[in-house]
Amino acid sequence: MITKPTATLVFGQMPLTIEQINALAQQRLNAELQSDAAYLDKIAQGARFLDTLLDKEGVIYGVTTGYGDSCVVSVPLAQVEQLPKQLYTYHGCGMGALLKPEEVRAVLAARLQSLCFGVSGVRVELLQRLTEFLQHDILPIIPEEGSVGASGDLTPLSYVAATLSGEREVLYQGKVCTSVEVHQQLNWQPLVLRPKEALALMNGTAVMTGIACQVFSRAEYLLQLATRITAMNVVALQGNPQHFDQVLFNAKPHAGQMQIAAWIRDDLQGLTTNQLSRLQDRYSIRCAPHVLGVMADSMGWIRQFIETELNSANDNPIIDADNEQVLHGGHFYGGHIAFAMDSLKNLLANIADLLDRQLALLVDTRYNHGLPSNLSGAGSETAMINHGFKAVQIAASAWTAEALKNCMPASVFSRSTECHNQDKVSMGTIAARDARRSLELTEQVAAATLMAAKQAVGLRLQQENSRSSETITQFVSQLADTYPPVLEDRALEAELRLMVQQINQRAWSLYA
């Protein structure tokens, strides 16, 4: 039985952070809707203003007109109430894998936050029901494929609109069931979506933004882990700690690059240059701060792009009830998320490539300065039949190659869709999914290299006069119980999977 969180995340007028969205997605925070009378009246004002326009038979895109290219088609008032149902119905064509529960929570949270700014023309009741979906952990079953990222995530978000209306399927209490069954169980009436409400739910960037929030935080931790692995490999390869000297990095003061060097320097504190194998280490060691530093220096603007999108009204049209106007625009366009995710997946692939090159050095007796071939820990009697980390290095190279292949930016593949109405689209959701895949691959490379680095440090410290720093010794000791040395060959899949899981869970405290 899952214990409900006691802390709450309030959706309303206040901006939210990536960390808050992810905490809610991981069920460490519960959702709550801002409930003061002034705020609720502000939300209701938009819906009331729309109703007055309907009374006057005003022309409003998606309310009294068809959708997309069909905006030139007028919808008679007698059919206006049916229009929202038509929208989510014909968009029920998603394909591919299903979003994971944590991702669906992030999507619901991102959509709720956008609607909470009070310019989408929806009722308070819709915001309350979205909040209740999060509180009761009612998760629409959402296929992840089918969005071009403008007009927003129409097809995947149609599954949110439909389930709020008592249609399609949800995951509830660990079981897939129909939405109407859950409504009956909770004694709720499914919502009959008002004019503009289906459009407000679907015509936005919540899927790409929800995925982006998740990818960002995992990537942030992975950057720190890659830094720690690099420090371990300096010890394992008897590298030169002066490569990370503060004076050296003061000469090229990119802030993130300097931070990476400082972390490695702290990890290697106490090591000297007395036992150098080479005056200058190979680039995957010596230039690690320069590789990792690019990502460290990019995370700030990537965060800004994601959090600005998260804290925005990103549907169309915008309902300005204060000035009694309807503003038709293109805020559903996911270009900022697309560029952020295309950039992040390239940064991640560079981490995979860096760690893969370090792993290649560790296993090769031409470059590992006296470590056993393939890091095998076997004794002399069985050394000839043991192959240690040979296959792990091959696998890591395969994962790296896939991450590198995935670097082609999705955002440049705009397609003209929907009778050339959507003739320039963002591909933001595909970019976010690509970034997630690159992240998964890079986490696998990190797991392989971390396991090998632990083995390599252990083997190095068995040699006479070899030394490690206190930080690296303690970290290797932390890993020892779960990941014993590879003495005789064994299948490492289960351990690699466990290590990836621990990376996802941020099992090790790294840097402040």
Image (cartoon, rainbow, N blue to C red):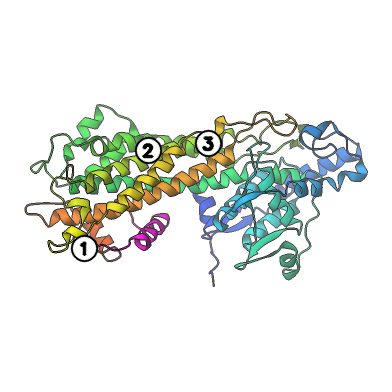
Instruction: Name the amino acid, label 3.
Output: Phe
Q: Is residue 257 magenta?
A: no
Q: Which residue matches tag 3?
A: 305
Q: Does the segment drawn in magenta span residue 493?
A: yes
Residue at 58% over, 53% down = 99
| Left-right relation of 501 to 415 | left
**Alpha carbon distance from label 1 to label 2:** 31 Å
Please name which of the two marks, 1 or 2, marks the residue nearer to the observer: 1
Q: Is residue 47 above or below residue 258?
A: below
- Whether 55 is drawn above or below 6: the answer is above
Q: Mark 3 falls on what kind of element?
A: helix
Residue at 21 percent across and 46 percent down: it is: 364
Q: Earlier in the sequence, mark 2 or mark 3?
A: 3
The amino acid beneath tag 1 is: Leu
| Residue 331 picture location, percent across and down | 66, 34
Circle 1: is it few (<14), some (14-19), or many (20+) Cα within 10 Å? some
Q: Would residue 411 appear left or right of 494 to someone viewing this image? A: right
Which range is magenta? 485-508
What amino acid does circle 2 point to? Answer: Asn
**In the figure, residue 76 lies in which quadrant?**
top right
Say if residue 12 shows up in the picture: no
Res. 487 mark:
1
Q: Residue at x 35, y 50 (%)?
A: 395
Task: Report crowding for label 2: few under 14, some 14 to 19, many 20 or more residues within 10 A (C-alpha).
Answer: many
* Secondary structure beneath label 2: helix
